[in-house]
Image (tube, rainbow, N blue to C red):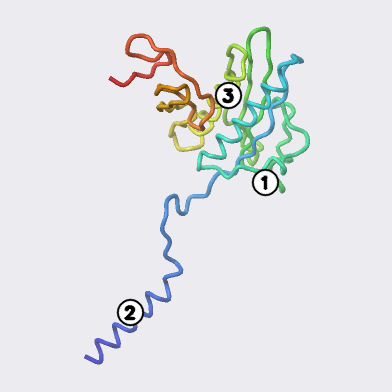
Amino acid sequence: MKRIAALLFLFLGTVSAQTDWIRTGTGLGVEKVRVAVADFKPATTDAANPELLKTFNDVLFNDLSQAGIFDVVSKNFNPLQAPGNPQELRLEAWAVPPPNAAMVAFGNLGKTGDDLLMQGWLYDVKNTQSPFVLGKQYREKSSVESARKIAHRFANEIVLRLGGGLPGIFESKIAFISARSGTKDVWVMDYDGEGQHQPLVRGNQFVRGMVAPG
């Protein structure tokens, strides 16, 4: 019995000594990709650009910050000169501290006539020989809502490319019931709570493709 007790004591002591190694949670051992998001530059001189750019830049940064798979660099650490195209990108400025990024998203956006045009890129700043990862161009009717939509789409593409093929959720819509108008009605909003509105309904379907409750 004394031998059994001694062995049990030794076993428990060994487990106790190793408890600092035991961790629980999700994504353990997976290092998040450090991504810098440069403010997109104006592509035209239209007077509407400042509001459209602010909306786009804020939404893109927030989407990537909330993705859960990135370590997004604070914009306070970004180099002073933001690139609007690949020719203006200085890889070494983003690859070293303080940004010390692995990837950088950058591009330009501007109102052209009645349209809003965006060109965006994702570059691997550590790979000086072949840094290109992603390039996208979007065109929508110019509006603040379109700036949000384009930012969501580009964020989804970045997640898809860097997240192991998993699609992003940033264009998702959430339907909910609200009595803010005095009666209970169906409302729709973006995944982040923005863009709340009452959808138009045709028959038993929302115009935006969401099937109304039966």
Query: Camera-side residue: 42 or 101?
Result: 42
Q: Which residue is mark 2?
A: 11
Label 2 Cα crowd, 10 Å radius (few <14 / some 14-19 / many 20+): few
Contact flag, marks 1 and 3 (Cβ < 8 Å): no
Q: Can you tell which quarter of the image residue 77 is in? A: top right
Picture mark count: 3
Residue type marked 2 = Phe
x then y, percent, for residue 1: 21, 90
Q: Which residue is mark 3?
A: 148
x then y, percent, for residue 150: 57, 22
Q: Residue at x 30, y 88 (%)?
A: 6
Vertical position of residue 73 compared to residue 6: above or below: above
Helix, strand or loop for disc 2:
helix
Q: Residue at x 64, y 41 (%)?
A: 126
Residue type marked 1 = Asn
Label 1 Cα crowd, 10 Å radius (few <14 / some 14-19 / many 20+): some
Query: Camera-side residue: 5 or 52?
Result: 52
16 on left or right of 1: right
Helix, strand or loop for disc 3:
helix
Q: Residue at x 55, y 34 (%)?
A: 63
61 on left or right of 15: right
Contact flag, marks 3 and 2 (Cβ < 8 Å): no
Q: Which mark is residue 100?
A: 1
Residue type marked 3 = Arg
Cα separation, mark 1 vs mark 3, equals 28 Å
Q: Can you tell which quarter of the image residue 88 is in? A: top right
Mark nearest the camera among 1 and 3 is 3
Helix, strand or loop for disc 1:
loop
Query: Camera-side residue: 104 or 116?
Result: 116
Q: Residue at x 27, y 87 (%)?
A: 5
- The earlier-in-sequence mark between 3 and 2 is 2
x then y, percent, for residue 82: 74, 32
